Image (cartoon, helix red, strand yellow):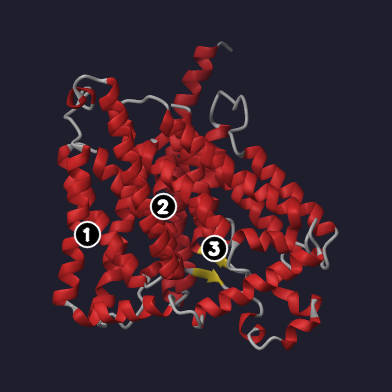
Amino acid sequence: MNSRAVESNFRDFNKSVLTAYIIVLILALITLTAFLVLRGQYPIILALLAIPAVVLIITQPRWALYQYILCLFVMVAIDREIPIFLTDISALLVIAAAALDLLTSDRLPQQFPRLFFNFVFLLTALSIAAVFGYDPVVSLNPLARITFLMVTFLSLYRLVVKAGVERLVGMFFWVCVLHSVIVVVPFIISGGEMRSFGFSGTAYDDLAMLTLPVGLALFIWSKAEYATKYLFGSMLIFSSLVATQSRASLAFAVFASAAVLILSLGRYRRIAARQPSVEKALTGSEAPRPVKKRVAVLCLSVILLAAAVISLMPDVYGAVLSRFESALTFKPSGTVRTRLELWRSALMAFSHHPLLGVGPGSFRIFHEIFPSLHMQPLHHYVRGLSAHSLFLHYLAEAGLLGAAALVALFVNQFRISRSTWRRQQPIDQTGYSLALYVVGLMFLVTTLFEAGWIWGQFGFPFVFFAALIVRYHLR
């Protein structure tokens, strides 16, 4: 049988036999759903209704990516005992979509993407630390989590080309903008007394911390018709960060925003030094980008927003100010005090086991490894928690080997994003490369001080942006 005959038969199968199977399946689902309605089996009904959505998602790579972004902002537990969250299911759908795309493609990948071997190095280091740790059994969960994140990263990397990096960055920004409204409204209604996080739970402040510099980069380097929208969205995200009253996230967001302004002005000056007419140099095929003017507009907008809050909502201003003032005292209290206790415990574990640590997953059972911790008054309140610093946590659990693998991963993703930003590129790509560069910087800096970008649900935004950074570098 020649190739034309095979192709003809395949088309006939798609048009007739496959359609008949789909119709029969739909009728069977309708019949079964009606039967379960009569029996009152509503959880099973919801599961059946989800089947068509799942099939549609895994067969449409763009939809798989879109639902992944949406789920990043919804912290819903499917099963808290295991635990399984909605983001875990979302990542599984992305993996299934990438596997289907790979199986139906006539070309296999020629090489692994950058950062893949960093994940392998990290897994290897954790495996070695687990073997020599206090309880290898508790290390299974961290190892499984890193493996799952690595597979999710590979899947996202493969699917990103189906939608485009620019579209995905923009969608992430606008989803955060919509969510910021959900965060800000309850905060204002409560007069600033309630810390608001929306559907994301305590993960929202970290997501907004990453998104704010993205919006500012797009505002400064976007076309005129989009600039005002990006500025308005960025102001909403900044307001929502204040609503969370998360001091560290807000401080890092301000740092990243300042980096966006400095890098933008630096790029503008370099273009002006090379070109006789900077406006012509910034034009290309599109309208010119008035970088200096937009930086001035941004600074003025922040001042006006702060003045409006102080004059129109003094209760909100007072509540926020009192919380931030408490962090500047010489006698730490509240979360600052407990965080210092966690850091002290991590450094104590590292000092006893500097090379391989106490074993992945063992930080939560420190009271069994170091009985003297029971003598510390604050240990009762922090027992079972993480070190609240990814770097210190890895020093404690995996020693110098694991911490080196962790730092190598985050340093390399930053180096890739910086390399993309520093090379010459069209004006339309400047905002996106700057956004990814600053996000890469934030991942690196916050990992050394606080955030946990490969813990639990926080790992999913990291592998998402890591895939965007690596894929955008190939342009």
Q: Answer left or right for 70 relative to 463.
A: left
> Image point 15% across, 69% down: which residue?
308
Give the residue at mark 2: 69
Between discs 3 and 1, the one toward the N terminus: 1
Q: Which secondary structure lies at badge 2?
A: helix
In the image, is residue 292 above or below residue 126? Answer: above
User: Toward which corner of the image does residue 352 lie, by quadrant?
Assistant: bottom right
Determine whether, in the image, residue 87 is placed left or right of residue 111.
Answer: left
Q: Which mark is residue 197?
A: none
Question: Marks 1/2: CA distance?
Answer: 28 Å
Residue 109 seen in this snapshot = yes
What x and y, as percent, mark residue 122? 69, 48
Residue designated by label 1: 302
| Residue 154 visible in the picture | no
Work out how far the residue at label 3 is from the one at label 1, CA to CA, in angstroms: 26 Å
**Residue 236 locus on image (x, y percent):** 25, 61
**Quadrant of residue 279 within the rendered picture:** top left
Q: Residue at x 69, y 47 (%)?
A: 405
Q: Which residue is mark 3?
A: 450
Residues at circles 1 and 2 in contact by the CB criterion of under 8 Å: no
Tell which tag, 1 or 2, sits nearer the viewer.
Answer: 1
Residue 406 percent across, percent down from the top left: 65, 50
Instruction: Name the amino acid, label 3.
Output: Glu
Check disc 2 and give the amino acid type: Ile
SS at mark 3 in the image:
loop
| Pointer 2 local density, CA inside 10 Å: few below 14, some 14–19, many at least 20 | many
Check the image and name the residue furthest to the right. 132
Q: Nearest the camera: 467 or 336?
A: 336
- Name which of mark 3 and mark 2 comes first in the sequence: 2
x and y, in percent, of residue 45 in the image: 45, 67
Give the structural element (helix, strand or loop) at label 1: helix
Q: Amino acid at mark 1?
A: Val
